[in-house]
Amino acid sequence: MRGKKLIILITGLLVAIAATVVFTADAAARRGTTPHRDVTTTSKSRPTSSDRANGRPSSHHQASNGVTSLGLRAGAGSPTAADLAAATAMLPKLSPAQLAGQRVIYSYAGRTPPSQLLNLIRHGEVAGVIFFSGNIGSHAQIAAVAKKLQKANAASTNPVRLPLLLMTDQEGGQVKRLPGEPVLSAKEMGESPTSWTTTTREGTLGAQNLRSVGMNVNLAPVLDVFRKPGNFIDQFQRSFSNKSGTVAKLGTLFATAEQARGVAGTVKHFPGLGVATRSQNTDERPVTLRLSLSQIRNIDELPYKSAIAAKVKLVMMSWAVYPALDAKFPAGLSSVVVQGELRKRLGFTGVTITDALEAGALRAFGSTAHRSTLAARAGMDLLLDAELNYRQGVASMNALEFDYVHHTLNATAFRAAVARILALRASLAGH
């Protein structure tokens, strides 16, 4: 009897083990990973930048489940229903690497885009490119570059049949990368006796200038409400006014004018840098702005209500810390600010974009890869890699691909971010 019981016990254990193996393998197959893969694998397991830049195809599976219940809606801001339909139809065609690449804005040094960047574009792993003064020699030169980038984007190896996001900072006055309009600074627009007409004109002419060279996104207008003359924002006359109502009206007019000419507007720096002193430069160092919740919402955020109602397409987040909202993370790394204030409280449904990921304000948050993960986790859609090296963008893309494949970022939220970006790109087609 003991022998028979032992045989029965062993048989039962073997059956249980076999069932467990089958269940694990089946679950892993549904996830698109092997049952042995450790989700805590270090960065050594990420696809290498040389693999991606040299055009070797990704070995990862294609995203197969499409878009269902992404929580997206056409509403107070971009995207429209038609743009969303185009975006959601495209999502199932994208590999994890391509999904990740759709969330990255690249940069490069000099006047000629590197061949590696063109190759990334041809394989659908780039959302767009930001241009700086060093990239621009003349209108004819940068227009030729824009055509070259869009030609790479039209390659048969790229499943994303939508315009690249080609952007720059064309605020006006002292802050612009492309020679020409807008000539006036935001402050000069605000001080004009005919400020409404003047701001509309400057937004229109600025957009026409950008479109003439193939650019379709402007990282402007600034909606910061400056507090003291000569402070961080006012020293270069980047703010329309020290009054929230004036900033709200003129910022909305500028954004509306440029979007009417086929250039997506970007309002910045949410929830506001207007109180920052001259030394509180987030490009250089960590900045904490100790405003009350009432000040943030009734002064600094007020212009965003108008811009969102006017369907501005993008919002750029600040890298400052606002203890009244989140004492630990800068705004662009804070889900409290991105998801709570901007999305839920103000109802923004368009595309969020970080400020430059290499900023000194983020020195406590590790590498580009780690910053990319934190930004995506907070709810940022586009990551701005402005280090003038395409490899920085590759680092962001690899980090997001790793997080997507290993489920360390929510897959539904990830696809929703990509859908918003694709919808933005769809809205710029035909201009």
Image: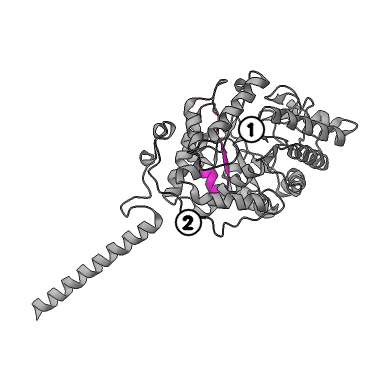
What colouring style does the render use? one colour
Q: Quadrant of the C terminus?
A: top right
Left or right position of 15 against 408: left
User: Would you identify the image quadrant in which residue 173 lies?
Assistant: top right
Q: Is residue 386 magenta?
A: yes
Q: Which residue is mark 2?
A: 65
Image mark count: 2
Which one is nearer the viewer's eye here, 72 or 234? 72
Residue 359 can be seen, yes or no: no
Point out the tag, 1 or 2, that comes first from the N-terminus: 2
Range of magenta residues: 374-389
Q: CA distance from mark 1 to mark 2?
A: 32 Å
Give how far across and how far down residue 163 sits, in percent. 60, 38
Q: Which residue is mark 1?
A: 167
Q: Amino acid at mark 1?
A: Met
Give how far across and how far down residue 303 sits, in percent. 76, 44
Q: Badge 2 local density, few (<14 within 10 Å), some, or many (20+)? A: few
The residue lying at 46 percent from left, 48 percent from top is 404
Which one is nearer the viewer's eye here, 218 or 332? 218
The residue lying at 25 percent from left, 69 percent from top is 16
Query: Element type at marker 2?
Result: loop
Residue 244 can be seen, yes or no: yes
Give how far across and how far down residue 122 sits, in percent. 50, 35
